[in-house]
Structures are given as structure tokens and as C-alpha cells.
């Protein structure tokens, strides 16, 4: 018997025992479950600005947690070692099992060091929505803050599992052309736009666009993006991070984005948005 996963736009149809495209969801007894539940690959107490979240408790720190897997295939991925990994890489990744309760206790133990809560980041958290939901519930119940760093390629059904429990998000807006989203990274721009709009209604949202030479580092595409952001309710106040690309993954032979390009596009973006930040410069 096959079953359909409804976490993202791919709607993978799976037979029992099969894994989805993201490597993090599996069909089991006629339902789809998160196969990476609690399988942590990265754990660090980071400055909140590293997420990046520049206008959410600036100067604080947040316990940052990553699992593995992703539902996109960005050829320029800056964190492909865990984002593109599957279960066969668990030993190499040094996976360690953490229950939601253990993450809560760890987050609480970091409070003296400036920790305000917990962020799911490093890989795509929405493909492990059950673990994110269960952990965020405990963090919120303890009076701490929750955050997600996500590509936003998730369904309304999946978003509603975590949105009421999430205080802040940084959402990757890879580019602003549907053809590139579909053909280059295997994503879905309309879904990301809906995800951003819905999240902005209920929690603090900041956006990040990685400026990749020859892909999305042109004024026309950027202005289409920022004009759309500004057109959301109070959209001009949504912070946008424009970050410099460095050669990674399948784009390892390309050159970094010129610093001058990043700063020039940031100035253009500021004609529509009140908070534009540059990164990796």
C-alpha cells in the first residue's frame, strides 16, 4: 500500500519502508513518519545574529540544532555535508540521539551563557516537523524562545504544526524566478511566498537571499523580490539579508560574489525595505 507525504510540494508517494526525496521521511505501516527524529548532527550555542536574526533579541545567543536531509538540491549549498546526507552517512556525521526533553535541559543549562532558547537550523527543519513541534512545545512551555531557519518549501499543513510554537524564522528566498526555483534547485517559489506571508502574520520573520554570480545577482530580479516583500502587510519592516556566495558543492569552481555587487544591491533594496543587511563580506 502506498502513502503520500504531505510535508512539502513533492508529495512523495511511498511504499512501506521507502524514504522520501529528503532522506528524512519514511513510509511505515501505512503512514509517513520522520525518520530523523532526534538524530542530531550539529549542536552549538550561536550568536542570534548568525541565524541570521538581527532584529530578534540582538546580542543574545541561541542553542542551535541540526539534523540531516533537505527537500531541495541547491547546487551552491553552503552546508551540503549534512543537508544532502542520508541514513548511510549517520556514522560519518557523528549522529547523536537527543530526545526533546534532553534538548530542553541542554537549552536551560546554557541560560547562564546568554541562551534565550533553541533554533532548528543547519539543515531543513520542516522535513522533521514532528521533532521540531515536540521540542518547540517543551521550549515554549519553559518560557524560552524558539526559532527556525528554513527554506520555506513546506505545505500549509506542515507549517501549522509549528507556526503557533515558533517565535522567529529566517526564511531563505533563493531567488525570485519560478523557472530557476523549479529547474535549478528543484523548489517551488509560490509555496515559499505563501510560507513567508503566513509566517509573517504570526511570528517575527527575516529573509535571506544568497547572491550567486550569474544566478540572482542582478538588479531586475532583486527589485522584483524586494517590491514583493514590501507589498506584504508591514512588509517594508521585514529584514532582508543579502549574503555573499562562496564556492561550495557543485559550484566549487566558481568565484565568490564580488563585495561591490553585494553592497550595490543592498543599496537598491533599501529603496523599498527599511532593514537590509549584508553578510559574508
Image (cartoon, grey):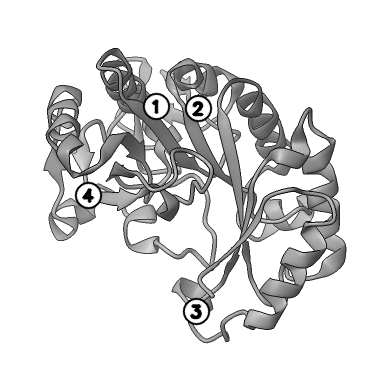
CA gap between label 2 and label 4 equals 21 Å
Measured as percent of width and height from the top left, residue 4 is found at 50, 23
Front in this rendered view, residue 35 or 230: 230
- Label 3 packing within 10 angstroms: few (<14), some (14-19), many (20+): some
Mark closest to the chain's N terminus, 2 or 4: 2
Which sits earlier in the primary sequence, circle 3 or circle 4?
4
Depth check: 75 or 241 in front? 241
Q: Residue 15: percent from the left, percent from the top?
A: 39, 27
Which residue is found at the position 19% from the left and 33% from the top?
107
Task: Work out whether mark 4 precedes mark 1 in sequence or the reverse, and give the earlier one.
Answer: 4
Q: Is residue 95 left or right of residue 36?
A: left
Q: How many angstroms separate mark 4 from mark 1 (CA)? A: 16 Å
Whether residue 215 sits left or right of residue 127 in the image: it is: right
Q: What residue does disc 3 label?
A: 247
Q: Which residue is mark 1?
A: 129
Using a 10 Å C-alpha cutoff, classify the residue at mark 2 as few (fewer than 14 neighbours), some (14 to 19) or many (20 or more): many
Task: Find the distance from the CA under tag 2 to the CA under tag 3.
Answer: 30 Å
In space, the residues marked 2 and 1 are separated at their CA atoms by 8 Å
Label 2 vs label 3, nearer the camera? 3
Amino acid at each position: 500500500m502506498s502513502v503520500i507525504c504531505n510535508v512539502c510540494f513533492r508529495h512523495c508517494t511511498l511504499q512501506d519502508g521507502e524514504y522520501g526525496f529528503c532522506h528524512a521521511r519514511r513510509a511505515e505501516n501505512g503512514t509517513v513518519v520522520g525518520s530523523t527524529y532526534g538524530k542530531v548532527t550539529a549542536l552549538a550555542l550561536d550568536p542570534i545574529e548568525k541565524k541570521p536574526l538581527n532584529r530578534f533579541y540582538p546580542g543574545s545567543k541561541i542553542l542551535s540544532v541540526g539534523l540531516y536531509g533537505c527537500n531541495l538540491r541547491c547546487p551552491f549549498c553552503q552546508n551540503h555535508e549534512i543537508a544532502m546526507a542520508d541514513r548511510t552517512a549517520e556514522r560519518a556525521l557523528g549522529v547523536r540521539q537527543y530526545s526533546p526533553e534532553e534538548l530542553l535541559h541542554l537549552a536551560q543549562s546554557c541560560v547562564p551563557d546568554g541562551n534565550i532558547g533553541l533554533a532548528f537550523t543547519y539543515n531543513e527543519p520542516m522535513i522533521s516537523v514532528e521533532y521540531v513541534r515536540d521540542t518547540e512545545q517543551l521550549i515554549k512551555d519553559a518560557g524560552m524562545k524558539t526559532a527556525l531557519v528554513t527554506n520555506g518549501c513546506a505545505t500549509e499543513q506542515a507549517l501549522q504544526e509549528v507556526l503557533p510554537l515558533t517565535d522567529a524564522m529566517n526564511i531563505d528566498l533563493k531567488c525570485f524566478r519560478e523557472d530557476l526555483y523549479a529547474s535549478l534547485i528543484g523548489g517551488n517559489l509560490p509555496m515559499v511566498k505563501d510560507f513567508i506571508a503566513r509566517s509573517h502574520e504570526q511570528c517575527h520573520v527575516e529573509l535571506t537571499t544568497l547572491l550567486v554570480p550569474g544566478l540572482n545577482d542582478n538588479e531586475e530580479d532583486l527589485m522584483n523580490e524586494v517590491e514583493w516583500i514590501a507589498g506584504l502587510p508591514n512588509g517594508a519592516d521585514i529584514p532582508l539579508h543579502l549574503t555573499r556566495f562562496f564556492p561550495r558543492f557543485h559550484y566549487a569552481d566558481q568565484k565568490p560574489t564580488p563585495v561591490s555587487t553585494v553592497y550595490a544591491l543592498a543599496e537598491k533594496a533599501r529603496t523599498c525595505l527599511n532593514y537590509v543587511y549584508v553578510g559574508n563580506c
